[in-house]
Amino acid sequence: MVSWLLAVALSAATANPWASQQFPAPGHPDAIGTYTAGCLQGAVPLPETGTGYQLLRPSHRRFYGHPVLIAYLQQLARRSHTVGLPDLLIGDLAMPKGGPFTSGHKSHQSGLDADVWFRFAPSVLSRAQREAATPLDLVDGQRNRVNRQFSPQHLRLLQLAAEDARVERIFVNPAIKLAACQALQGKPHGWLAKLRPWFGHSAHMHVRLRCPAGNDCQPQAPVPAGDGCGEELLSWFEPPKPASGTATVKAPSPQPAQCRALLTP
Ligand SMILES: [Zn+2]
């Protein structure tokens, strides 16, 4: 039994060496490559709890990030706390050296992506509760609109998250973007441009930071001009493109050669 488990663990490690990395790569912080084909040098861990937030699934060890991401999340949590929101629940960041997860999403590779859940923590959760927490879905998939769980607190969180200059874009379900557009009609809403409609993302927002200056990461194309509440958003609600379907899977692009060096001890 033990040898069988060992064999399974070994084959998983061979298949994806990034998932078995226990420690960050030493050196100055450097986000390398792209969000979907990259790695991370000089990562730091997000502490399991802090003012205004609690970390989910600590046993998954996906709580490493570029120091810019860690600082951003801690400041977002402090700001949320200051305006009276309950604690944020923080999901996946990156693994110690970044790289592709064995399961789940394909980005989060360069230490600049983080998932923040739409479920808030009304009280201090135990470690076991943080391991077992269940997501709060804000979208009614039948109607393709937000459900009654969507609240002004979520709108406030989205705004606080997006207004930060370090943020490049935030992925949310199209129904959530639509709800934000409708709620803010007639009010200043420059930050809405950064909310990008995407498949899924109905129970968490995916925050993506800009490539920090001097790092070896490749920036993405900037978000389109305007608040993104017009035709592009509405196209998500037209048949046959389902807002809650799955994205087309493209062949993975190779990681930069620099990443290989991080794996050699
Ligand atoms: Zn994500």
Image (cartoon, helix red, strand yellow):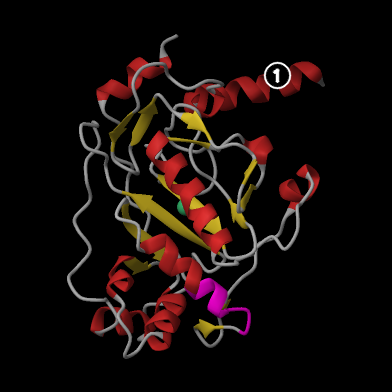
Is residue 149 placed above or below 82 in the rendered structure? below
Q: Residue at x 51, y 46 (%)?
A: 74
Q: Quadrant of the C terminus?
A: top left
Residue, disc 1: 6
| Extreme residue toward the front, this view | 82
Q: Would the CB of label 1 be found within 8 Å of ligand 1?
A: no
Q: Quadrant of residue 68?
A: top left
x then y, percent, for residue 92: 54, 46
In magenta segment, residue 167: no
Front residue (pair 209, 73): 73
Q: Report the side of 183 relative to 150 (left or right).
A: left
| Extreme residue toward the right, this view | 1
Is residue 112 placed above or below 17 in the rendered structure? below
Front residue (pair 225, 250): 225
Q: Quadrant of the N terminus?
A: top right
Q: Residue at x 28, y 47 (%)?
A: 210
Q: Residue at x 74, y 21 (%)?
A: 4
Is residue 106 placed above or below 8 in the rendered structure? below
SS under mark 1: helix
x then y, percent, for residue 42: 40, 24
Res. 140 in view: no
In magenta segment, residue 151: yes
Circle 1 residues within 10 Å: few <14, some 14–19, many ≥20: few
| Extreme residue toward the top, this view | 265
| Extreme residue toward the bottom, this view | 186
Res. 127 in view: yes
Q: Report the side of 113 relative to 81 (left or right).
A: left
x then y, percent, for residue 105: 47, 49
Magenta part of the chain: 148-155
